Amino acid sequence: MHDKNRVPRALQSGGLLLATALVLQGCGGSDSTPAPAPAPPAAATPAPAPAPAAPTAAQLKSTCDTLVGQVIEGVTVTGTTRFEANAPIYPAGFCQVLGTRAPFLDIEIDVPDNWTGRYWQQGGGGFDGRIASVATKDAGGAVTAVSPVLALKGAVYAASNGGNRADVPAQAAPAIWASGTDDGRQSATDYAYAAVGTTLQFGKAVAKAFFGQAPSHSYFNGCSNGGRNAYIAAQRWPQEFDGIVSGCETMDMAGQTSGWLQAASLGGTSAALSPAQTGAAYAAALSACDALDGAADGVIGNPQACTFDPAQLQCGMPGASTDASLCLSTAQVATLKSFLSDLKLQNGSTVLSGYSWGNGLGLGWGGLGGGFALLASGDPAWLTPAKQAGFRLETDYAMLGAGLAAIGADHDKAAIASYVASGRKLISWHDGSDALLSPNDHYRNWTTMTGLARSMGLADTDSGTRFFIVPGGGHADGAALEEVDWASAVMGWVEDGHAPTQMTYSFTDAGGTARSMPVCQYPRFPKYMGTGDIHTAASYTCS
């Protein structure tokens, strides 16, 4: 990093000679003693090299055409496509560059003609397998939408498939990781962390191929596994990203995986809930807690304030359903309560902070838990219900922690704290009603991380990182930049010093009504002010 207060080496040496001359003059001597020769003039500081001239439209098109077949940072460019400007969808043309690196890593880089110097890397989701492309196309292949980071922010856009191909069964995760082959092991490593680094190196090199210079500001954004990717970027490549947005992940995959497998161990027993029972339970909680934010609008605006007791759903209780397929047994009530409570070891230490009320608690957890257990252990049996039924928290939690750390799929909170303490910016966020990854565990781990940043000298952690809750959102709601403008929030913080305090979540509710609510900085939540349209964010305050 350039230090504005550093004296150039040429001036340091010249100053030393001048000071020596002055000392000799001050020592006196006879008139016959010749005066010391004057110090040579200090060498002029060389002028900075001029920035490369902006390429012409013809040069941009030529570069797009000539990249095919080149190997850049170990990635082979397999194809390029030129998209001419198509306002209002995208006001400037861009080149889409596709590349691949063995065995199964596919990457997309999109380079806009009106580049603003920004680089934006997008994370994946689930077990990945597909590229989160910059463009949305209709059935005929026509572009119907383009990511705002390219269309409105002029950023180079980068994304990958995470190192596996969901549409090719023999190359899809998590099965490919269980193959026992070198390709399978590399695919697992790519998913764990390496795909992020390869995409980063390739993306920035492609940008330089077009414009002759590196990006001036670089960002990473992601939710779910993309949120995991984002924290991986902060801890492994902190110098490469000025700002990072990480959503709907927990900053501790060993703990989250333990929660998933603890629930999966009940599969096939009388304690497990059916999807219908899970949905009915959430509907009852919503009915009880909807108005806590001042508006009965079909959203639990402050899920932490919702203390609805699952015991009320037990068959035979006054408030329980009379439908035997929807009310809960005593064992099922205990299961649901366990989801809403902290998961702890026998020594009392917390493995996973309990969930808030969300729709779908317990559903699909075994598939995700099994995949991450496979990454940690290398044992394909974790993909089966039989193995998951034998999950034992006291022993398997340690295995998950060690194994996920060894393959590089989990998090180093101290490294993330160092990223924040260095002056870079991190926005962490979660959906308030996420039923897949615990929002409360995310906040707990984020708080631990900020404590570490404080111990590193960052007195005001609010100056480097902030945590937000998307009200009422289920898993990954609000991840789209059209729903919450995370791009403007992190770019404004990095480039202009405007720290985000509140954003807006724009969505369509279950009844088809377009509406908006404020995204508040935790621990604040939206509160209806008592007047105005309950479907409009302006009618709420963060309190």
Image (tube, rainbow, N blue to C red):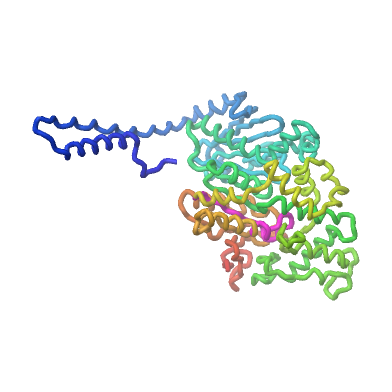
Residue under the point 75% across and 44% down: 376
Q: Quick one: 369 or 291, which is closer to the camera?
A: 369
The C terminus sits in image quarter: bottom right
Return the x and y of residue 400 as percentages of the image width and height: 75, 48
Furthest-left residue in this view: 31
Query: Is there any visible trace of residue 104 in the rendered image?
Result: yes
Q: Is residue 493 left or right of residue 375?
A: left
Is residue 422 covered in magenta?
no
| Picture layout, residue 421 above or below residue 8 | below
Return the x and y of residue 539 as percentages of the image width and height: 58, 67
Q: Quick one: 199 or 350, which is closer to the camera?
A: 350
- The magenta segment: 423-443
| Picture layout, residue 90 above or below residue 273 | above
Residue under the point 64% across and 42% down: 144
Numbered circles on residues, count? 0
Furthest-front residue in this view: 30
Residue 263 occupies which quadrant of the picture? bottom right
Query: Is there any visible trace of residue 511 in the rendered image?
Result: no
